[in-house]
Image (cartoon, helix red, strand yellow):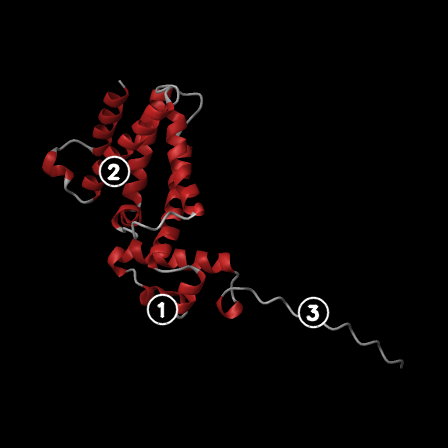
Amino acid sequence: MQDQPAPPPRKKAARSSGPRGEHDRDGFVALVAGAAESLVRHEGFRALGMRRLAGAIGYAPNSIYNAVGDLDQVVLRVNARTLERLHGALAAATDPGRPARENALALADAYLVFVAADPRVWSLLFEHLAAPDQPFPDWYAAALARPVGLVDAALVPLIADAGERRRAVAALWAALHGLASLSTSGKLAVLTPDAPRELARLLVGRFLG
């Protein structure tokens, strides 16, 4: 029996750049953000800390610092995920074939539904204050621009001037945020027995004229 030629040596798999080689960087960032989001969703913002987060994913805190950054950066990653989900919810609520005013009311409805479904994770967008001298990373600015841009586009037929429309988007978003905050905290009933949806539609309808 003739000797069989030896098989060619296997190439070693390229070790990924994530900690312990189990994840590439994007995968590890997603792992951290998902775990942080889960902690906030189930226990609130106060439960989110580097040691607690590291324990949840089975890594040392330094791994998170090296791959993601400090707690501010972790929060931004969670918030970027929230903004992407919000964009999806708002996009699903709009219909190009509908009048612009109806789309604006539908966006208000969708926003309140989104907040009510995940209030703790949503509130992280506003509860956590990063250092004021730290600019937003490009990837976060892009995530924020998507839902804001969607609302802006929906209002174009109603508010032609771009500067006025930008201010209108900010004013409506701030007003809906206040309404949603009171609703999810159970404090809205102190002011009125009316349902949040009715108040949101009144607010948007009166604002747009």
Q: Mark 2 points at which residue?
A: 177
* Sequence-first disc among 1 and 2: 1
Q: In the drawing, does residue 183 fall left or right of residue 32?
A: left
Determine the residue positioned at 11% across, 35% down: 191
Please indicate, yes or no, whether residue 47 appears anywhere in the rendered image.
yes
Q: In which quarter of the image is the N terminus?
A: bottom right
Q: Which amino acid does label 3 sit on?
A: Lys
Label 1: few (<14), some (14–19) or many (≥20) C-alpha neighbours in 10 Å:
few
Q: Distance between the residues labelled 3 and 2?
A: 55 Å
* Sequence-first disc among 3 and 1: 3
Q: How far apart are marks 3 and 1 (CA)?
A: 34 Å
Determine the residue positioned at 42% across, 26% down: 95
Please indicate, yes or no, whether residue 44 appears anywhere in the rendered image.
no
Q: Position of residue 187 (x, y in %)?
A: 14, 41
Q: Where is residue 27 in the image (x, y as percent from the top left)?
A: 49, 58
Q: Residue 55 carries which label?
A: 1
Q: Where is residue 180 in the image (x, y as percent from the top left)?
A: 23, 38
Q: Which amino acid does label 2 sit on?
A: His
Q: Residue 11 carries which label?
A: 3
Q: In this view, does 14 lie above or below 166?
A: below
Q: Which amino acid does label 1 sit on?
A: Gly
* Sequence-first disc among 3 and 2: 3
Q: Where is residue 148 in the image (x, y as percent from the top left)?
A: 37, 35
Determine the residue positioned at 30% across, 27% down: 168
Does dot 3 land on a helix, a strand or a loop? loop
